[in-house]
Amino acid sequence: MIPFDNSYARLPDRFHARLAPTPVGAPRLIRVNRALAEELRIDPDWLAGPDGMAMLAGNAVAEGAQPLAAAYAGHQFGNFVPQLGDGRAILLGEVIDRHGRRRDIQLKGSGPTPFSRMGDGRAAMGPVLREYLISEAMAALGIPTTRALAAVATGEAVIRETVLPGAIVTRVAASHIRVGTFQFFATRGDTDALITLADHVIARHYPELEGREDRARALIEAVAARQAELVARWLHVGFVHGVMNTDNMSVAGETIDYGPCAFLDAYDPRTVFSSIDRNGRYAYGQQPRIALWNLTRFAETLLPLLDSDEDAAVKQAEAALATFGPRFDDAYRGGLARKLGLSELREGDAELAGDLLRGMAENQADFTLTFRRLCDAAESPDGDGPVRDGFVDPVAYDAWAARWRQRLAEDPQSGPERAAAMRAVNPAFIPRNHRVEEMIAAAIERDDFSPFETMLCVLARPYDDQIEHARLAEAPENGGVGYRTFCGT
């Protein structure tokens, strides 16, 4: 019932370990993403039925699937680990969707693998619901991301700090190939595998590079370009990934691995949510720098493919990496200009946006609400009140708003056109951290998935004013100060 076509399984054996998921005792369907199933050319009714459920729970291997755990390495908080790999995930196979795109289908939380490193290979309910909800919210926001096809309760307990209900999320991705996949072979000096992997990635994600003599350098530039655009989009919506290790950076340019991720409430570029990020390595404002650090590790793996002379290879890598900064700056500044209602970027606009962000940080203004309320203020000064109310010192907003309005007067859009354009890029709804926690608590403590379903429906239309769900747009009373997330699917 699933038209599998598994290119990664056709790579040499050292790329993966072949094994089936570990069955569970009493699986129960939480949700099937019917729209995504149809996009993947999978019958959603079959998926929600007995045979589909058996596959989603890991109790049966569907016809055509070739389950495997992928090998990879990675820098974790700056420390290199030469072997990581899929320790709690199994790639079932690949499909070609209705748009002609190749997509992975992977079970996460499906039992131990040879890469589990003494772990149980299972996932707890909370992280599964978090990944499902936030990845789908990111997709609706227009940000490249893995997707969630289904969530299943296993009927079995997992032991973390406490005993928790287990679950499995079925994840869909352009691929699960990471910077760490390249590092796995580079650290072993396996140049043949690096060539095979690079050719596979180019054919799959960057076919325009096939046949080029400089395709290794071009691949670095292409991956850097996608990462520059991706991280800029994260910043535009206040997203903090939380654990930007090299094994969590997809070479396809998608957001992957929603562990200790969260969204800004009160704006502060130093914001860290992960409980284990004690030095702020992966803070909101550090994400562009870390992306470049990760890309540098990626470029290092490709040095043997760039040139047989090491010095010449390093120069090529440095030149390719130098494209990241300008690409990121253009994407970030252009996005901020659109968030402020400017149809074109002019000299001084970056400073105007930067001054607003500084004022927001100094006045504990909520990131999402400030930009959403600016949509009304752009249409008429009568809309200034709600924006001012979000600043500890409203006069700080007044001084900036005078400069902003002067700049808007030079822009060709009418007030209503500008407001409409701003509402299309400034979401009314994000997965508010405190609401995500309430949703998880309801599911775990009361077996109540209605908050999960409600949030999914609201976040599917993040740019629409949904007055009946206004409470889901509200900021927490303390601006989210002290909120922490934890690794641990």
Image (cartoon, rainbow, N blue to C red):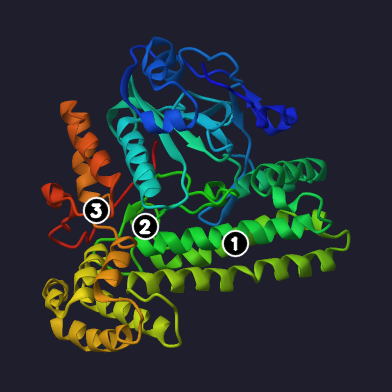
Q: CA distance from mark 2 to mark 3?
A: 19 Å
**Residue 113 in the image: x percent, y percent?**
55, 25
Which residue is tagged 2?
Answer: 239
Residue 280 relative to residue 448: left or right: right
**Quadrant where the C terminus lies?**
top left
Residue 451 relative to residue 183: left or right: left
In this view, the residue in front, 283 or 206, is 206
Q: Earlier in the sequence, mark 1 or mark 2?
A: 1
In this view, the residue in front, 485 or 473, is 473
Q: Earlier in the sequence, mark 3 or mark 1?
A: 1
- Identify which residue is drawn at 64% across, 70% down: 323
Residue 54 relative to residue 419: left or right: right
Q: Are marks 2 and 3 in contact (CB under 8 Å)?
A: no
Kind of residue sitting beneath label 1? Ala
Relative to 400, is 253 above or below? Answer: above
> Which is in the foreground here, disc 1 or disc 2?
1
**Residue 376 in the image: x percent, y percent?**
19, 70
> Which is in the foreground here, disc 2 or disc 3?
3
Q: CA distance from mark 1 to mark 2?
A: 19 Å
Which residue is tagged 3?
Answer: 464
- Identify which residue is drawn at 33% across, 73% down: 341
Kind of residue sitting beneath label 2? Phe
Q: Earlier in the sequence, mark 2 or mark 3?
A: 2
Kind of residue sitting beneath label 3? Asp
Residue 27 relative to residue 1: left or right: left
Q: Secondary structure at mark 3?
A: loop
Q: Secondary structure at mark 1?
A: helix
Q: Is residue 424 visible?
A: yes
Which residue is tagged 1?
Answer: 225
Query: Mark 2, residues whose alpha carbon is within 10 Å: few (<14), some, or many (≥20)?
Result: many
